[in-house]
Image (tube, grey):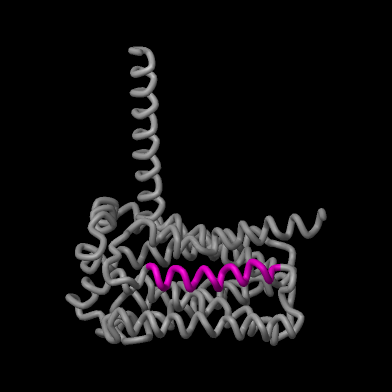
Amino acid sequence: MSDYNTDLFKEQYLLKKSCFFSDKLISLLINSSTLIAITGFSLPFFSFLLYDINVDFRLLLSSFFVTFAVYSLNKLTDTKEDKINLQNRAEFTIKNRHYIILSVIISSFAAVYLAFSYTIFAILIIFFPFCIGFIYSIKVANFRLKDIIFMKSLSVALAWAVIGAFIPIVVDSRGIKMISFVFVFFFIKLFINTVIFDVRDINGDSLNGVRTIPVFLGRKKTRILLLIMNSILIFWLIFSYFQGFFHRYFIVLIFATVYGYWYILYFCRETINIRMSRDLLVDGEFIGVAILASLHSYNSIFY
């Protein structure tokens, strides 16, 4: 009996230790912008598959680094709001401020270097989200995009949509109609994504005078707006199907649309107050989508 209790105690101890380690690792990935940078890799990866273009990992790494740089820069400028909304992130940013500044510089140069082996078009695509991130995060002549209602969400969604829609066509061109369909899909998905996080940050943004959509409309009206936008994707699915686009990944696209309904309803609730799971389930959406699309592509080839 004593041996059984000892073994049980060891198992419980190891389980608690592994859970603690997992929490610390996830927290580090989120606070350091590594998780969102992996999304910056995964989103254009999925786009390569949608276009049926051979994946170029140099461009994906360039997207990874520019995403890391932009979101790390944003953490440096958002410390005031984060002290209210995300205390752990604010503490991490303040504690590691010099390392974060260095990582922004190194990541920016790495992103440009990796894109440089292609045309000037590739560099412009990579620079676009960085420029948007700069005027979004930093006040110049008392102006920044983040302080203008709707412009925050529109600018973030636009930057992501440009990365998703245009990085693959650096390698191989596609028709304007297909590019437009891909652009619209990513724009709507990432607009919803960024507003979901504004719902989380509603208290800190209100106190600091940042007029986001949830601050302006309130939680309930914001939820209705997001559900309407996600419903546009149903029509997008129908039109793209009859255009003959993306048939191989249609199940994955349907999943992404249904999943959007779930996290809108879940994370726009009045009583919800979940931190890390929101980053994993919303920011990490395209990591899962890219994995599903890869598995589906593999099965389509071999079966």
In magenta stretch: residue 260: yes
State the image coordinates of residue 142 (x, y, percent, origin top left): 25, 84
Closest to the observer: 119 or 253?
253
Q: Compared to 31, does 168 lie above or below?
A: below
The image quadrant of residue 264 is bottom left
User: Which residue: 63% across, 59% down?
Assistant: 292
- Give the farthest residue toward the front: 1
- Determine whether, in the image, residue 297 is placed left or right of residue 229: right
User: Which residue: 47% across, 85% down?
Assistant: 228
Q: Compared to 238, does 115 lie above or below?
A: above
State the image coordinates of residue 223 (x, y, percent, origin top left): 37, 79
State the image coordinates of residue 62 (x, y, percent, origin top left): 56, 62
Closest to the observer: 142 or 45?
45
Magenta span covers which residues?
Answer: 249-266
Q: Main secondary structure of the magenta part?
A: helix
State the image coordinates of residue 195 (x, y, percent, origin top left): 38, 76
User: Which residue: 32% across, 81% down?
Assistant: 220
- Give the farthest residue toward the top: 2
